[in-house]
Amino acid sequence: MYQLDTIETPLHWYTRSDRFYAMEHSKLNYEMTSPDYIDFFYGLEKDEKSRLLKSQATLYKGINHQLINAIYDRLYSLFTEGHDKHIKIQAHAELSAVSRGADDCYELEFYHNALHKKFTTDADCIILATGYTSRVPDFLGSLEHMFQRNADGSLHILRNYSLDNANRIFIQNAELHTHGFNAPDLGLGAYRNAVIINTILDHNYYPVDLGTSFQSFGCAV
């Protein structure tokens, strides 16, 4: 791991986003990572789900507050010591091409999506954090006829995480479009597992806590 006070070669950090987003951390927002909110989200119309997901990026994407503050404090310390010239942080920079440059380096071409201009830089080493997308693995092709799909081709996932009406095939971490931003939350892994196991056993072997939120997500009564 790099020690920021000993870097002798430039270290650059680019993002296509318009800023470096910090994740939202508040107790009322934490209540949204709950079975109560999943129940609420699951019952919404498809268009409303899509609208909400677009507005909830900072609930599950972004940088931990403690980490981003620690990075800033270290950069400030390096600045006061005159050692900040090797570090560059830039937003609005979308990587569009990578090629081999001189001296076995990489030449990176970026597009500044606010100024609408291209710029290039060289690098000895590249770390790409591109995110992920869900897809059905090829080895499940023989089971495709059992999957339920929506009109747009997306997987129709039941509230109990089943892909078929017979409760034989279950899925986790790919139900963002049906269950909400909680889908990739590892903190809810035990809850999802309990729901799936209880469904398979056809009785509540594992207790599932409900009604744990102070706020109401549907129409308050």
Image (cartoon, helix red, strand yellow):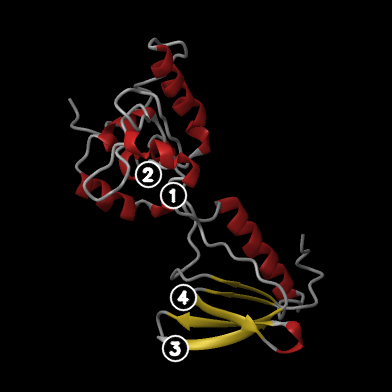
- In this picture, is 204 found above or below 41? above
Q: Which residue is mark 2?
A: 176
Q: Quadrant of the C terminus?
A: top left
Marker disc for residue 117: 3
Mark 2 and mark 1 residues within 8 Å of each other at the beta carbon: yes
Q: Which residue is mark 4?
A: 92
3D distance between C-alphas at marks 3 and 1: 32 Å
3D distance between C-alphas at marks 3 and 4: 11 Å
Left/right of residue 98 with respect to residue 62 in the rendered view: right
3D distance between C-alphas at marks 4 and 1: 26 Å
Marker disc for residue 1: none
Q: Which residue is mark 1?
A: 134
Residue 138 image offset from top left, x and y in percent: 48, 46
Residue 23 image offset from top left, x and y in percent: 48, 52
- Secondary structure state at the residue bearing disc 3: strand
Residue at left offset 45%, top offset 40%: 140
Look at label 1 and name its amino acid: Ser
Residue 193 image offset from top left, x and y in percent: 48, 25
- Secondary structure state at the residue bearing disc 1: loop
Label 1 neighbour load within 10 Å: few <14, some 14-19, many 20+: few
Look at label 4 and name its amino acid: His
